Amino acid sequence: MPKFLILIPTVRDRAWVAKNLENVYASLTYPTDVLVKDGTRGKSATLNHVLEKVLDPAEYSHYVTLDDDILLPYNWQHDVLRAFAVRPRLGAVGLDYSNTEEGRAYMLELNPEEVYEDVTIRPLHRQNIAGAIIVMPTQVAKSVGPYPLNGVTTYEFDEDGFRCMRVKQLGFITGYVVPTNGYPTMLHAPDTKEYLDKKAADIEYIQKKRKW
């Protein structure tokens, strides 16, 4: 049976995160380990550590990186598994947010739906998967490899772009899976001014220096 590893890196108040974790657990329908890791040293540093030291292909079939401010629909794992099963060369997926204007803006590239048996997918051609949730087969995630840390930024908001670029370089495609039990919900977290200021500075730096 498939088994998932979900990694949630966070810099937010743990009580706030714990409340949202109740939804994560309620959405699960397959064996899953959920790791909530301190992301204050940087999201990508946390992702790199788990990818290299924790994610074991012998134990986990699928690897999920999940932001701490997303509410997931029930049984989304089944939709994702069906997508990987029926769509050739699918290497990474997110969940479709197109039910709201905010969600459509977040996705950036809203392509026509492809229906395969009991699952619907929106393939991506130009944009990367928005980083709130990215799901990969473990072997693909291992092949993608770690994000190349530069020692300048703390919150590498282009790491989703890096991973999607690597997936495509490996010969796979990316896209969004349309959930069958409702859409994800993006929450608005009570972030500190310090976090928001650092986030804005890192985004500005990345936009000028990014290579993918």
Image (spheres, rainbow, N blue to C red):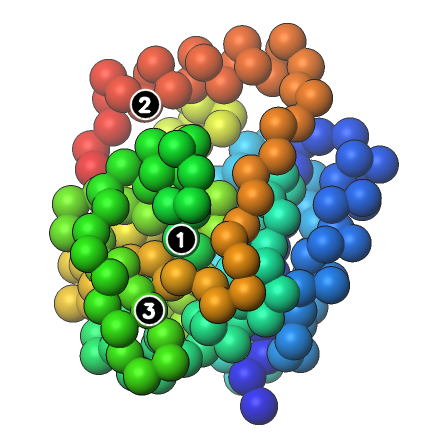
Q: Is residue 112 above or below residue 149?
A: below
Q: CA distance from mark 2 to mark 1?
A: 26 Å
How far from the left and from the top, in percent, is residue 191?
Answer: 66, 20
Task: Tell me what residue is drawn at x 22 percent, y 79 percent.
Answer: 88
Pick whichever of labels 2 and 3 is earlier in the sequence. 3
Q: Residues within 10 Å of mark 3 (few under 14, many from 20)?
A: many
How far from the left and from the top, in percent, is residue 39?
Answer: 63, 37
Local SS, label 2: helix
How far from the left and from the top, in percent, is residue 82?
Answer: 41, 80
Pick whichever of labels 2 and 1 is earlier in the sequence. 1
What number is the disc on residue 120? 3
Residue type of the residue flagged with mark 3? Thr
* Residue closer to the observer: 161 or 19: 19
Residue type of the residue flagged with mark 2? Ile
Q: Is residue 22 above or below residue 60?
A: above
Q: Nearer the viewer, mark 2 or mark 3?
A: 3
Q: Quadrant of residue 153?
A: top left
Q: Which residue is mark 1?
A: 96
What number is the disc on residue 206? 2
Q: How many marks?
A: 3
> Considering the image in quadrants, where does the N terminus appear?
bottom right
Judge whether residue 129 can be spotted in this image.
yes
How far from the left and from the top, in percent, is residue 129?
Answer: 33, 48
Q: Residues within 10 Å of mark 1 (few under 14, many from 20)?
A: many
Residue type of the residue flagged with mark 1? Asp
Q: Residue furthest right?
A: 15
* Residue closer to the observer: 144 or 64: 64
Q: Is residue 124 left or right of residue 75?
A: left
